[in-house]
Amino acid sequence: MTPIAVLTILCAALPQAAAGGPPDAAASSRAYDVLVQLNPHLRSDGPAEFRLKMHSLHRGPNDFFRGSAELYYDWCRRHCTDWLSDRRSVVLLHGDVHPGNTGTFRAPDERGDLCYSLVDLDETFRGPFQLDLLRAMLSLRFAAAENDLSISEGNWDRLGGHLCRSYAGAIDAGIPDSTLRQSFEIVRVLMDEAAKEKAEDYFDRFTQTTEAGRRFRRVVQKRKSASDFLDPIESETRKNLSTALLDVFGPAADAAHSHFPTRKSLETAILDMARWTRIGSSGSQGVAKYLVLLRLPGGDGNGDLRMLQFKEQPVPAAARAGLLEPQDNRAALVAAAHGTLQCHPSKWIAGVNVDGRQFLITPKSPWAEEPSLKDLRKLRDIEEMASLLGTLLGRGHGASIKNADARTAVKAAAGELPTSLAQRGAEAFDDLNELYDELKRDERFLKAVQEAATFVETRSAPRRS
C-alpha cells in the first residue's frame, strides 16, 4: 500500500473534526481536504496545531507556499515523473528551499566565525536535484508577486538560467563563505547585521530574572506584538528532555559533541525548559517544540547562556505526498544532513527520541539573520537571490555527491534545465495560487483561522496575578 493510500485511510474523518462539523458543499475545497489528509501528524482538536497552521497559511500566498510543502510535492508527484524516475539526478535535497531558509549562524560551537548557508533542513530527503531548484524558482515567483513586482516570462527564463548556472558552477567549487560575502550584497548585509547582535538583548527578550533565577517569559514580544508563547512542561517530559541532552552532549558522547563532563554538570547547567509555540511559523507550525535554557559550565554571564530547541521531526512532506517511503531514525538523518548541506558541522546539532517521538536539537541563536520579502523588491534583488540560491544548493548538493562521474552528470543535467524549469515554475505557480484561492473561500478553513486568531489574542493577553 502506498503512503498516499495509508494517509487517505488514516485521515478520512479528519476534515470534519478539524473544523467542528461538515461544511456546505459549495464552501468546501480540495485544497483544505488535501492539507488535512497530508498533515496527519497535527492534532485537529486544539488551536495550537492544525488550526494555527491554517492561521499561518492565511497570511498571504507567500506564507501559503512556504507553509504547504506537502502541496508542492503532491504537484511534483503528478507533473515531474521524468525527474522522479531519473536515478542519475539523485542528491541529498534541502527539501524546502526559499530565501528565508538561508541565513547566518555561528559554527561549530556558537563561538566561531559567522557563516552563511542553507538553514532549516526539516524536509531534507534524497531525490532528484531538480526538485530543489524548482522549489527555489517558485519561491522567487511567490516573493515577487507578494511585492507586486511584475516580471515577464522572458525574464523568468533568464532567472532560471542564473539559478542553474550558479548551481552547476558551485557543485565542484567548495565555495567558502568569504566568497559568498564578496559576491552577494545580501550576504554582506545580513552578516553585518548578525555581527551587531548582542546576546544579552536576545536572551532578555526570551527570558527574565526571577527570584528562582533566569526563567523563560510566558509571552515573547517582537515589535510590540506577541511572537512566541512559552508554556511550562510536565515533569516527565522535562526529565526525558534532560536525558536526551545527556545522551548526546554528556560524558558518553563523542569528543566533538561532549559539552558536559558529568550528569551533575548538565543538571546544574539547565536553567529552564518550556513548550514553544512560534506564532509566525509556517512550515513547522503545529509540531511539538521545546526550548531549553542553559548556562554552560564555568560561566556566570549572559555570554555563557545557550538556548537549544527541540523540534519534532514528523514524516517529511515529500513522504506524506507519496514521493518516498517514511524513514526510520528521521531526526538522526536530518541532523546528519546539516553537516553535509550546510558545509559547517555544528557541535550543538543532534537527533534524539523523546516520549516516543523524533526530535532535532539545534541552537536557537542570537546571530541568526535571514532574507525577508523587503529584500526582494526589485528585479535585480530577485536576480541576486536566484544566483545565491543556486550557489548554496550547488555547494550543498555537491558535498553529498561522492562520485565524480555522478557530479558531472548532475552538472550536465542542470545545464539543460532552465527552459523546463521556467515552464514548470509558471505552471506550478498558477496551480498553487488556484489552490490558495479555493482555500480562502472554504468555510472550514476560515473557521479554523478565526479559532486560531482567538487563541492567539487570548493567550497574548496579560495574565492576572
Image (cartoon, helix red, strand yellow):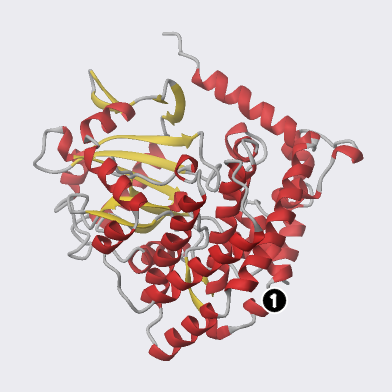
Q: Residue at x 69, y 68 (%)?
A: 77
Is 442 left or right of 330, judged from the image as shown? right
Three-letter amino acid code of the residue under disc 1: Thr
Judged from the image, the secondary structure of the residue bearing numbered disc 1 is helix
Q: Residue at x 47, y 81 (%)?
A: 411
Between residue 129 and residue 51, name the one nearer to us: 129
Residue 438 location (% of width, % of height)? 79, 44
Is 83 left or right of 240, judged from the image as shown? right
Residue 213 location (% of width, % of height)? 22, 24
Residue 27 visible in the displayed image: yes
The C terminus sits in image quarter: top left
Q: Is residue 332 above or below residue 263?
A: below
Name the residue carrying label 1.
Answer: 81
Q: Residue at x 25, y 37 (%)?
A: 197
Q: Is residue 324 above or below residue 416?
A: above
Q: Residue at x 59, y 60 (%)?
A: 155
Between residue 87 and residue 373, name the one nearer to us: 373
